[in-house]
């Protein structure tokens, strides 16, 4: 797409929107929130999607011993510690690369991730939520381990990076060998980045499931645990040419509603189209049907449609007028809900440094 075409596209979107509602300038966070109110993928750690106040520090474990040791630290003086989070590959034994590449079942098992976490129910409460979840990438055509050509490319780059450092010398120490490995890893990072950029738009199908329980008083005992909520996700991403990706998602969350009027179920079915015709331009369009059900209050049950469109381009197109960065233009929100609530649609535009739409 030419530079001349970008500005008219943005102006056309602005003109069409102003007829509906006056536009408002916002930060990139507001734009991202507006267009991404519905998740179109599996949470990387499904357990955390069910927890409030999610921690940003996640412990990534490798061996079963690490997992057992980490879980043991979650209980202090008989009480669960809130704010713990970890993920772990429970089936990390995949055999040789040749076996891995020949057996899809091994690939699924190796890619499966178990996540677990805890969080305080609310400020001042002694109760703790404990949650566990599984992410199962059933199909992932971007998996580098499953592609012999990618493995050969990485091996060749690794050998070249080691040779570039010269011979290790006679009887090198473990520290010296580790330094060579770290240096080689840095040298081949551009190759890894190139592989990731080339494989972002590959066929993927993920499943996710998570459950959460409330531990009264923070005590992790069978008689003190009460089921709180559970969730199921499925997401499919399909390439439509090199620069266009279509994705669909379905999600169902069930809560243990303990009072009349509390939300007991929420479901989402939707799809998104992302277009990256060139590095400095991106477009996202999404639509989803959402429904919510409430305990003993069928008259409050809701159904609504969420829509969102976002255009993002580099401000180098308008370098004569504004500083470098990104320009985002978005329009979306919720259409009319059950019960006569008016549509919650808005137009936003913003100038920001770090792009929102990424491959």
Image (cartoon, rainbow, N blue to C red):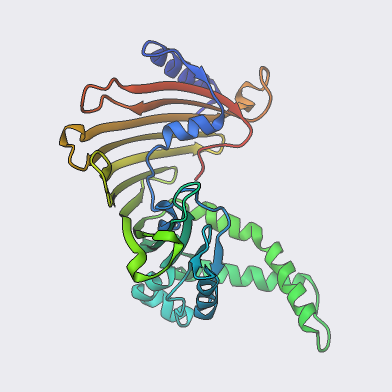
Residue 130 visible (yes or no): no
Q: Position of residue 193 (x, y in %)?
A: 59, 55
Q: Which image quarter: residue 212?
A: bottom left
Query: Which residue of the protein is positioned furthest toward the right in this rendering?
Result: 169
Q: Position of residue 99 (x, y in %)?
A: 42, 81
Q: Position of residue 259 (x, y in %)?
A: 26, 44
User: Residue 355: x percent and y percent?
Assistant: 57, 36
- The correct choice, above or below, for 285 with respect to 49 in the image is above
Q: Nearer the viewer, residue 96 or 147?
A: 96
Q: Using residue 348 as the reference point, say whether residue 253 is left or right of it.
A: left
Q: Is residue 101 above or below residue 194?
A: below
In the rendered view, does 191 fall on the left or right side of 283? Answer: right
Which residue does the image show at 53% across and 37% down from the upper left?
A: 356
Q: How many marks?
A: 0
Seen as rendered, the residue at the extreme bottom is 171
Work out whether residue 143 can be spotted.
yes
Q: Nearer the viewer, residue 288 or 334?
A: 334
With 164 as the anchor, is 58 left or right in this view?
Answer: left
Q: Quadrant of residue 325?
A: top right
Farthest top residue? 19
């Amino acid at each position: 797409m030419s530079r001349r075409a970008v500005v008219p596209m943005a102006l056309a979107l602005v003109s069409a929107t102003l007829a509906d509602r006056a536009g408002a300038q916002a930060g990139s966070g507001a734009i991202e929130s507006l267009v991404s109110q519905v998740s179109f993928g599996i949470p990387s750690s499904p357990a955390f999607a069910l927890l409030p106040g999610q921690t940003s520090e996640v412990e990534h474990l490798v061996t079963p011993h690490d997992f057992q040791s980490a879980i043991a630290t979650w209980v202090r003086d008989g009480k669960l510690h809130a704010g713990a989070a970890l993920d772990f590959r429970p089936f990390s034994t995949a055999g040789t690369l040749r076996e891995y590449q020949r057996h899809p079942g091994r690939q699924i098992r190796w890619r499966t991730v178990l996540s677990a976490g805890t969080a305080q129910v609310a400020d001042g409460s002694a109760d703790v939520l404990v949650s566990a979840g599984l992410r199962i990438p059933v199909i992932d055509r971007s998996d580098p381990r499953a592609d012999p050509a990618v493995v050969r490319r990485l091996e060749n780059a690794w050998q070249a990076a080691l040779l570039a450092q010269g011979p290790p010398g006679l009887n090198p120490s473990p520290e010296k060998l580790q330094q060579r490995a770290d240096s080689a890893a840095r040298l081949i990072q551009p190759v890894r980045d190139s592989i990731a950029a080339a494989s972002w738009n590959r066929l993927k199908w993920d499943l996710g499931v998570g459950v959460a329980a409330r531990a009264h008083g923070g005590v992790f005992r069978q008689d003190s645990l009460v089921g709180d909520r559970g969730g199921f996700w499925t997401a499919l991403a399909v390439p439509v040419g090199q620069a266009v990706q279509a994705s669909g998602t379905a999600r169902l969350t069930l809560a243990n509603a303990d009072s009349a009027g509390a939300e007991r179920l929420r479901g989402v079915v939707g799809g998104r189209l992302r277009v990256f015709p060139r590095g400095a331009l991106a477009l996202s369009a999404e639509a989803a049907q959402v429904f919510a059900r409430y305990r003993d209050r069928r008259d409050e049950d809701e159904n609504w449609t969420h829509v969102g469109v976002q255009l993002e381009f580099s401000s180098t197109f308008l370098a004569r007028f504004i500083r470098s960065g990104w320009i985002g233009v978005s329009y979306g929100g919720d259409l009319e809900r059950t019960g006569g609530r008016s549509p919650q649609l808005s137009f936003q535009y913003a100038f920001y440094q770090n792009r929102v739409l990424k491959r």
